Image (tube, grey):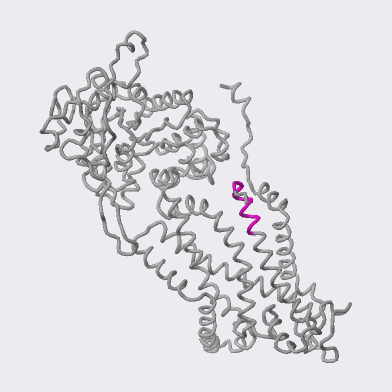
């Protein structure tokens, strides 16, 4: 026995497939490109004050509607604000909204979906009918409805608790966007989680855990969710671009972030409204923020596709 | 092993039934039929014995094992274990009883959580029953690994790094972790290589002796069941048709179904094997949704009588602790 033990490995170790996964993503060109664009956006969002050459709301009325130049890479808008700075700061808005909406969706969707899938019965009926009701509305219409109806409520509430200054600063606009998108976002997530949980709970290792006396909440947390997470990560990584886009058009339509707060959506709205008659000449004012927004949506989609392929090697188109 | 078997029962199963409903409709579901997977079982499992449970695929063997452990809640009947009726226990009370009864699964590739390390898998029962934590838990896990014949340094590895036989040993260690009295072995070797099967069987026998375990051993391999069991129960379409001592069952089966089964076992002696007469049953196993009237076996029975079509034969002791359900016996 002693000689046998000596010949066996004596190091305890944990192998992780993360590095392997990363390699598979980075060797897939569209996914690598997507990852690069996403990283650029994150970098811009985190270091916006350092990267942007001007404050996002600094007006220079002597220098309006100018095309790209060395001092103003993306030109200036009708109030003489530096477009490059506004777009960099816009990344911060976009990232903040993406992160918060995802957090709200996860916080609602994961527990609700897991409860519906694991316990079934009336809990399942109530939760999934609520999700169905959300799905019955055209998605964006419902978001507009929520955004438009909750905003006065939130502003009044801020005034009541003595934060009328806050109501004026525009921070509450973020709350409105996040709540509106998060309230919609949980339903799709809950559906996915529920479907995953329902298949995984019949697998032998889950029955094994129950047989050894593992309590239900722990079965869900330790055994089911970790095995359900892969397809959900893929779907979510594709959905992140849609959140940026949704924030974009809420702001474009004027019920999201309000100027001068920088959002790619309201930058497009401001400039498109003012300059569409002078279309070819002033195109960069609309085109550049639009391109940035489109690039982000594509980037998340490519990245999500790559992630999916990396996680499911059997998928061959 | 027969000497360790005492006439003291550990598990008593009374009138156990498990029906799975077949429903129709999406919102308003109505029950259209039942799959009668287990249709009225009465038997006991004695302390320290191995009770073999054999039968064809789909006859309800696994469902019986799971219904005893309350992994499927029975539709009817009682399961007495350690003086308690498991069927009547709920929630936390039932969970606490699981400390004394465990299960080993058929497929070692499906029965271990792929995202947990071996240490977490084996240590989890210790944690959820508040037996050991932290360093103590790790020591116990390493001890368990050694008991089942694995290197104790494997604690931080994942199931996919092991072979089928090694995984099954991990499954055994998990079942053993809480020092149970009773283990349901649900076809624990049928997914393994023949060369590995013997190792796992020997391990199970060793552990039984060492830790005074009682097994319900579910299998369809008659030779394996003969080797490991003290008594054997034969199931057909949701019912036990015969239950007796292993030797009596293999030497002098009484039920026509058991006779047909036994005639299918090859005999490792060419002279006797030559003379072996096979009883070939005609037809297929009927659907458990609509089992035949009377005796479930009457549609395929070579000695069927009129009474078999009308009356369900009682499962009774015909002498010498030999239980059988047949009108002709």
Q: Nearer the viewer, residue A297 or B217?
A: A297
Q: Where is residue A103 in the image (x, y as percent from the top left)?
A: 56, 67
Q: What residue range appears in magenta?
A: A304-314
A120 horizontally vs A158: left or right: left
The kind of secondary structure the magenta stretch mainly shows is helix
Q: Is residue B258 above or below residue A167?
A: above
Q: In which quadrant of the rendered image does the N terminus of chain A lie?
A: top right
Q: Is residue A250 above or below residue B283?
A: below
A153 horizontally vs B22: left or right: right
Q: Where is residue B249 in the image (x, y as percent from the top left)?
A: 25, 22
Q: Is residue B50 above or below residue A259?
A: above
Q: Nearer the viewer, residue A306 or A258?
A: A306
Residue found 50% across the figure and 78% down from its top: A142
Outermost residue toward the right in this view: A70
Q: Which of A72 and B177 is in front in this view?
A: A72
Would you say residue A9 sits in the magenta stretch? no
Residue found 68% across the figure and 85% down from its top: A259
């Amino acid at each position: 026995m002693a000689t046998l033990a000596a010949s066996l490995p004596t190091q305890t170790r944990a192998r992780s497939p993360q590095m392997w996964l990363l390699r598979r993503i980075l060797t897939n060109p569209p996914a690598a490109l997507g990852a690069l664009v996403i990283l650029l956006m994150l970098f811009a969002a985190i270091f916006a004050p350092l990267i942007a050459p001007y404050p996002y709301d600094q007006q220079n009325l002597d220098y309006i509607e100018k095309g790209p130049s060395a001092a103003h890479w993306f030109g200036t808008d009708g109030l003489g604000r530096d477009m490059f700075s506004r777009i960099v700061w816009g990344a911060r808005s976009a990232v903040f909204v993406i992160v918060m909406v995802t957090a709200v969706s996860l916080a609602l969707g994961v527990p609700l979906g897991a409860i519906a899938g694991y316990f079934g019965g009336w809990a399942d009926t109530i939760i999934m009918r609520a999700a169905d009701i959300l799905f019955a509305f055209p998605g964006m219409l419902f978001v507009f409805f929520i955004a438009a109806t909750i905003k006065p409520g939130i502003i009044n509430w801020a005034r009541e608790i003595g934060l009328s200054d806050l109501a004026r600063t525009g921070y509450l606009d973020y709350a409105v966007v996040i709540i509106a998108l998060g309230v919609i976002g949980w339903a799709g997530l809950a559906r996915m989680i529920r479907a995953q949980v329902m298949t995984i709970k019949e697998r032998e290792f889950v029955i094994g855990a129950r047989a050894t006396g593992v309590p239900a909440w722990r079965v869900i947390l330790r055994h089911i969710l970790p095995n359900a997470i892969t397809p959900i990560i893929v779907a979510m990584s594709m959905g992140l671009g849609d959140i940026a886009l949704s924030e974009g058009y809420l702001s474009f339509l004027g019920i999201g972030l309000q100027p001068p707060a920088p959002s790619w959506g309201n930058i497009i709205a401001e400039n498109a409204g003012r300059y569409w008659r002078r279309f070819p000449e002033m195109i960069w004012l609309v085109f550049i923020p639009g391109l940035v927004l489109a690039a982000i949506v594509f980037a998340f989609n490519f990245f999500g596709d790559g992630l999916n392929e990396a996680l499911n090697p059997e998928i061959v188109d | 092993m027969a000497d360790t078997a005492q006439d003291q029962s550990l598990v008593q199963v009374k009138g156990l039934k498990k029906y799975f409903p077949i429903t129709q409709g999406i919102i308003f579901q109505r029950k259209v039929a039942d799959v009668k997977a287990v249709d009225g079982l009465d038997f006991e499992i004695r302390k320290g014995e191995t009770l073999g449970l054999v039968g064809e695929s789909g006859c309800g063997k696994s469902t019986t094992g799971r219904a005893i452990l309350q992994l499927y809640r029975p539709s009817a009947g009682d399961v007495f274990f350690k003086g308690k009726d498991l069927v009547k226990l709920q929630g936390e009370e039932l969970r606490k009883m699981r400390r004394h009864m465990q299960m080993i699964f058929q497929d070692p590739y499906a029965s271990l959580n792929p995202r947990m390390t071996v240490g977490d898998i084996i240590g989890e029962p210790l944690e959820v029953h508040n037996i050991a934590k932290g360093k103590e838990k790790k020591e116990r896990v390493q001890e368990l690994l050694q008991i089942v014949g694995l290197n104790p340094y494997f604690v931080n590895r994942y199931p996919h790094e092991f072979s089928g036989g090694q995984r099954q040993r991990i499954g055994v260690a998990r079942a053993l972790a809480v020092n149970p009295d009773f283990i349901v072995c649900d076809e624990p070797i049928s997914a393994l290589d023949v060369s590995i099967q013997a190792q796992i069987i020997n391990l199970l026998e060793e552990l039984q002796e060492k830790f005074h375990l009682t097994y319900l051993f579910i299998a369809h391999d008659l030779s394996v069941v003969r080797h490991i069991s003290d008594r054997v129960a034969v199931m057909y379409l949701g019912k036990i048709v015969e239950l007796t001592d292993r030797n009596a069952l293999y030497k002098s089966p009484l039920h026509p179904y058991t006779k047909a089964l036994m005639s299918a076992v090859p005999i490792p002696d060419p002279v006797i094997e030559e003379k072996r007469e096979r009883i070939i049953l005609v037809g297929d196993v009927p659907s458990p949704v609509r089992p035949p009237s009377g005796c479930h076996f009457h549609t395929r029975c070579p000695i069927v009588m009129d009474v078999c079509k009308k009356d369900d034969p009682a499962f009774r002791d015909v002498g010498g602790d030999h239980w059988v359900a047949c009108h002709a016996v």
